[in-house]
Image (spheres, helix red, strand yellow):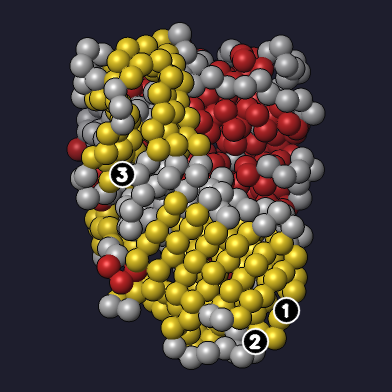
Amino acid sequence: MKLTAENYGTYLNQVYSAWLGKIIGIRLGAPIEGWSYSQILEKYPEITDYVCDYGIFAADDDSNGPLFFIRALLDKNDITREDIGNTFLNYIQEYSGFFWWGGVGVSTEHTAYENLKNGIKAPLSGSIETNGVATAEQIGGQIFSDCWGYVAGYDPYLAVDLARKAASVTHDGNGLEGAAFVAAAIVYAYTVKDIHEVIERALSHLNRDMEYYRVCRDIIRFHHENPDDWHKCLQYIFENYGYDKYPGTCHIIPNSALMIMAMCYGEGDFSKTMCMLVQSGWDTDCTAGNVGSIMGALVGIEGIDPRWIIPINDVLNASSCVGCLNIQTVSQSAVMFAKLAMKLQGLKASDYRHFSLPYATEGFFSDGQVTVNNDQLSSDGTKLYKYSYYLGDDVYDARYDPVYSPTVYPGDVIRFTVDGRARIFVEDCDGKIYYGQEGSKDMEFTVPTGVNLTVHKYGLIYQDGITVTDYRIIPSACLENDFTGYVYDTYGPRYRGDDLVNIRGYVPHSGHWQLDEKGLRGKCDDHGFITTGSLDMLVRELDTEFEIMKGVFSVVFDSQGYMHYSALEISDDAVSLIRKDDTVSVIERKANRHEKGVNELSIRFEDNGIICHLNDREFSFDNPAGRHRGIAGFIVKHGDAVIKNLKIRA
């Protein structure tokens, strides 16, 4: 079967079901991650539903990986291992969030990150040769690989090729086999509706000499000989493939044995398979995430009980260094996967209509009941709202250190198409509410501007229920931050034992950033990087006041992450236009003697160039990148600087 324009709608629904299955598995397994079977049995004798009411689930490494590694395909189809490694560096905060930072030689991803940072390219960054067998064969090789099954169309060979490339950035050996198995199984599950045949076909892509293949075969054999009692198989796994048999904190082989067991004994039933798997223990969010993805593709949305779907409310949070991308939805990201699949086939996807996927509330909440039918979102309450930015009390916990930049800014235009009468409203992070005029059908509201105004929520208020058929945000940011009166947000305790505290709306990639009486202070022995804004934020004017105590200071703009940005760099003797696309280039350098004390910088972006005023001096630069959209922020290199304020105008 081949992906075409005619079957794209079907394919989108299949990808959505698979991705939703993964999100369900993560949410189901997260509270008991790392527990043994006996520990789970004592606390939860029979798991039949979520064991924790998360509300808004914060973030998880199992969903972070697929969400961001896949973005290597945004700019080109024929990606290399090195491209995926650079994507890895583009979206990951240094030593915070995204995945487990357990130390070099302990955490596989941490180890690979250090290798990439120090110039060791993929696949050496994740190889056995570089890191040793134990590190290279932990479970991360397969837990991020679902996405390659989402973008491969109906081509398992493409899925396997992409999965092996991506996994080699961090893993090797059996880690690559697991990645290939998961990606292939998802592709086969779209069309093959027998789970045993799905497993067989996926295994045909593996190296038969590798332990991963042999263990899968052994569990299949055991099931064939003992088809009626999964507990016997579980005991067999403990005795032959338990954690005591393999090195490291989370080896791929024991957990993959549990995955094969659950799929064999689950008889193609989503709920039975998932509950059996998490009841068995060990790395429950990883195993349930991968199996949920395969099973979601197998059974489709109609085969997943609503009790698993409704609590998610289509909300998907992440913990990358691009804060606006940390607030997403399951449906929004499924559309991205499916569109990339079309792109790989040389096809263009049809436009997506909001609310056209089942249960796709797009993260809207209500004081009443929210339902999705016939490409419409309906609420019988009096208030419908969506988060632009999360405060600490909004999310359940600080799992994987999620920090955010708003998705809506002062000056942006909010548009709704509704059936009924309503007002658009915006609520800021201080609880102040701004109302638009009452209206119906096509409505719009320009977000008010103000110093340090951060949009917390936006939506509609009404009296007798409402139906929404469309909405959109038109970027026209008018951002103004005075850092001398700025605030932190606290998100609660995190794994390392302290509270996650972050400067509101700003995401630090690296360096030490804090607020003091002078403003936003950045210190770094190497390279400190912090940003805010949205990827489509239009920037025509940017103004800031700053003081450099030591080192080099830069203002960042046109940024798509840590590996892709432009910057105006100010050193002791020059003002330079910098462009980074994986590597840094100096576009143009102008001599300048830096003045001590507070400096005023004004940047104006024109069609063919950049005009900069630094105090009373003017500098002009050509702008070959030609872009005026993206996140913005600051860099401190080998130094110490204070930023008093930042103003951005579209």
Residue 78 falls left or right of residue 49: right
Residues packed near mark 2 inside 10 Å, few (<14), some (14 to 19) or many (20 plus) = some
Disc 1 marks a residue whose amino acid type is Arg
Q: Position of residue 178 (x, y in %)?
A: 61, 41
- Residue 439 shows up from this direction: yes
Which callout, 1 or 3, points at the residue further toward the start of the chain?
3
Q: Position of residue 370 (x, y in %)?
A: 30, 18
Q: Position of residue 274 (x, y in %)?
A: 40, 26
Residues packed near mark 1 inside 10 Å, few (<14), some (14 to 19) or many (20 plus) = some
Residue found at the far front of this picture: 616
- Residue 495 shows up from this direction: no
Towards the viewer: 580 or 427: 427
> What secondary structure is found at the residue carrying circle 3?
strand
Q: Which mark is residue 469?
A: none
Query: Which one is closest to the eye, mark 3 or mark 2?
Result: 2
Towards the viewer: 588 or 83: 588
> What secondary structure is found at the residue carrying circle 1?
strand
Which callout, 3 or 2, points at the residue further toward the start of the chain?
3
Q: Residue at x 74, y 57 (%)?
A: 608
Give residue 460's quadrant in the image. top left
Proximity of marks 1 and 2: CB atoms separated by less than 8 Å? no
Give the Cα distance between marks 1 and 2.
Answer: 9 Å
